[in-house]
Image (spheres, helix red, strand yellow):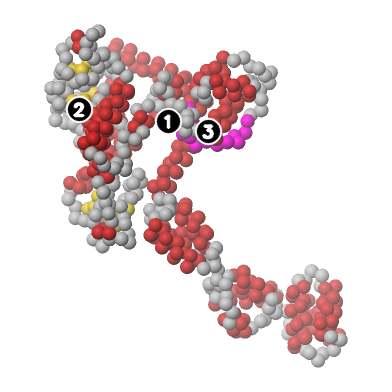
Amino acid sequence: MAAAAMNRTYLEILREIFPRTNEHMIQNIIEIVERENPNDVFEGKIENMINLLSGDGAAGPMPNVDNVSNSLFSNLTSIFPDVDEDYLHEYVAYKPPFYDIEDAIGELSMRDLPTKNPDPTIITEQLKAALPNADPSYLHNEACRLAKLPLHQEALDEFLGTAIRDHNYPTMQDYLKNKKHKEEVATYKDNFNLQKFLQTFPDPIETFTGKNRLSGLDDNSTDSDEKYALNFLYNSYTRIRRKYIDLVFKYEKKDLVAVCNRLDKLHNSLLRPRPAENEAEDSTNVTLLQMISFLKYRKQIERELKLKNEAYRHAKEEARKFNLFETCQCCFDDELIPEEIYFCMRGCSFCKDCVKKGVEVGVGKGDTRFLCMADCDSEFSLQTLQMVLPNKLFERLAQKIASEEIRKANVDGLEVCPFCDFATILPDEDKIFKCENPECLKESCRQCKHESHVPKRCNEIEYDEDVRRRTYIENKMTEALTRTCVNCKKSFVKSNGCNKMTCVCGAKMCYLCGEAVNDYSHFREGGRCPLFTNDVQINLQRVIKGAQQAKSDLGDVEIKFDPALNIQEFFF
């Protein structure tokens, strides 16, 4: 009988006796018996095979073949740690039990073995060390991609070389900006908090329903924004037909406040409410989400404002009853309750608006100390500034104050970021300054104070006058926005009220032309200037005119970063 046919016969007999035994194991036993007892008769061979497969034999119990294979695999992975483990598993699976480890090592050493994929976490850390200013999520994705490539080390070296040379990767600043934007979106979509909303918008009624209200949908809105807004309307007015909502939406030119006001007056056209609409479209338009949050929680907001107004009215009555009113020494408002008063470090009292406006003017001039507006030679504490300033402005100011204090200490090796106020001490061998300010995070050259230009030297980089030109225009725009007292020369900005201004020094002047005045005759009918004007429009016109004058002063030069571009967005 031919060997192949005999093997098939052995296999058929043994499969009937051991139906649950792996066929691969049966084949291994057949090979062992054939190799060890080639001259034995057919019945003797079958008996030996049955004894081996059943665990019995002359030498005692048969060792578990799986354990033998596992032992071989374990030994091979320790000897070939960089080889793909799936490959070793497959190699061991086709070897008989008790296969000699030295034979296996000899065979594998002669082959071109596939290496295992590296851990993406390790590659991610390597990329972070080489590109500290890169978006970490981008680096992680690239690490996962590189780890799967056959020649991953060569691909990694090529990727790093290109990234360092061309800087063609999203930055950490982009990552933090996107993360912050996502958190802000979540604030209005998933985690709405009434008190935080009122902190952001102290007068939400005016902000969202006034003449100059925010517009959630404008020319820059996407189709997704529009569909998201309509989805909100469908779910808010479930007893009004969708086609009516669409008509009102179009008629009111997508003005959500006007749309809701009109829909509130419509009679329900459906006896039963429509099923809720699924949010098929999403939106990351923060202004739109703020508007929808206001409309969605409007009753709660109005109720909370009513409670606050009642509490304030009660506090006013108590202050009047017990003679507790305070006076602001800047605007001379003499009906301020104690909670509305803020003090300089010598106890001069001011209202929040006056302190805030005074500090904002100082910040615009680059000040880090803010003197008392009553000329008592004192200043406002950092705690007071924190209470009156918006969070973002205070954070930037605190960073600048801290950096200024460090600079004054005159510490050896102190370096300041040329793009912000962050300061730190660096060893002499570090040629690149890596800013740790989350709003900056730029890498700059310590020698030329420009952005990092590695691997080029400073004398290989060509610079221009863009920064000087932009700063000159910005300064002229600031000068156009502020007014100067005709008497004491203090700067100030008016936010509302009439154009007859009274300085803390007692001098009176016209806000429009700057001329000193004694009474209202300057503003009467037929006078030179109107008593009331649109302050926003006036300030915008002056700032634009200041920018135009600055550009004229600079002459016929290119302005790469025009600070006057889209300046209207900051006023409306």
Which of the two discs, 2 and 1, labels the residue nearer the N terminus? 1
Q: Quadrant of residue 46?
A: bottom right
Residue depicted at 30% across the width and 60% down the height = 456
Which amino acid type is shown beneath numbered disc 1?
Lys
Label 3: few (<14), some (14–19) or many (≥20) C-alpha neighbours in 10 Å: many
Q: Is residue 243 above or below residue 458?
A: above
Secondary structure at numbered mark 3: helix
Report the span colored magenta: 277-291
Label 1, on which residue?
196
Q: In front here: 369 or 244?
A: 244
Residue depicted at 68% across the width and 74% down the height = 93
Label 2, on which residue?
491
Label 1: few (<14), some (14–19) or many (≥20) C-alpha neighbours in 10 Å: few
Please identify the dominant SS of the magenta region. Answer: loop
Marks 1 and 3, how far apart at CA: 24 Å
Q: State yes or no: residue 282 in magenta.
A: yes
Q: Are marks 2 and 1 in contact (CB under 8 Å)?
A: no
In percent of width and height, residue 37 lies at: 78, 89
Q: Marks 2 and 1: which is nearer the front?
A: 2
Which of the two discs, 3 and 2, labels the residue nearer the N terminus? 3
Label 3, on which residue?
225
Residue 318 lies left or right of residue 379; in this view the side is: right
Instruction: Give the farthest residue toward the top.
Output: 525
In percent of width and height, residue 34 lies at: 77, 86
In percent of width and height, residue 401 lies at: 24, 41
Q: State yes or no: residue 546 in magenta.
A: no
Q: Marks 1 and 3: which is nearer the front?
A: 3
State whether residue 571 appears in this view: yes
Which amino acid type is shown beneath numbered disc 2?
Ser
Q: Quadrant of residue 337?
A: top left
Secondary structure at numbered mark 1: helix
